[in-house]
Image (spheres, grey):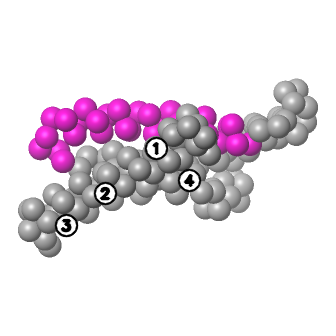
Amino acid sequence: MPAPVSQQKIIFKRKHNWLMTYLYVGTFGFFLCFLAAFFFSGIGNGSTFRQIPVIFRAQHLKGLTEGTPSHSAALRQAEIESGAVTGFTAGIAAYGFFFIPAMFANFSVTSAMWGFVGFYASCVVVAWWFYARPGAEAPS
């Protein structure tokens, strides 16, 4: 039975909803003409959706004892938010199919490509800072 929207809307207050959405947009099909992009997009796509439940579960269960009512409630809330973030992230990323052609239609090819390079560079920085560096807030 799906959770009601009233319980899911909490994700809009969660920083990691926005960070994971931002990172996932970067994995959703830019540079379709380069084989490397397919490879890295697939890795990013899969890892983003594997990270979301790990991040929210770890944050909600931090400091709780397994088997307690608060642990069970936190686990349920983490599942609700993970599902909502996954759906929200995928929905926002679908706009990539609009923005990619729009970039090429409104800017020179070189400018559009540099814009994509800048976006991907920012994705690498965000992923490293929040999830991969030593002492990261939500290592995963």
Whole-percent x and y of residue 58? 69, 37
State which tag comes first along the sequence, 4 or 1.
4
Q: Is residue 58 left or right of residue 30?
A: right
Residue under pointer 2: 119
Frontmost of labels 4 and 2 is 2
Q: Amino acid at mark 2?
A: Phe
113 or 2: which is nearer to us? Answer: 113
Amino acid type indicated by mark 1: Trp
Tell me which segment is drawn in magenta. Answer: 31-60
The nearer-to-camera label among 2 and 3 is 2
Q: CA distance from mark 4 to mark 1?
A: 16 Å
**Circle 2 Cα neighbour tier, 10 Å, few/some/many (<14 / 14–19 / ≥20):** some
Q: Upstream in the sequence, badge 4 or badge 2?
A: 4
Q: Label 1 crowding class (10 Å Cα cut-off): few <14, some 14-19, many 20+?
A: some
Judged from the image, the secondary structure of the residue bearing numbered disc 2 is: helix
Q: What is the crowding at mark 4: few (fewer than 14 residues within 10 Å), some, or many (at least 20)?
A: many
Callout 4 secondary element = helix
On the image, the x and y values in percent for residue 86 come to 52, 45
Disc 4 marks which amino acid?
A: Asn
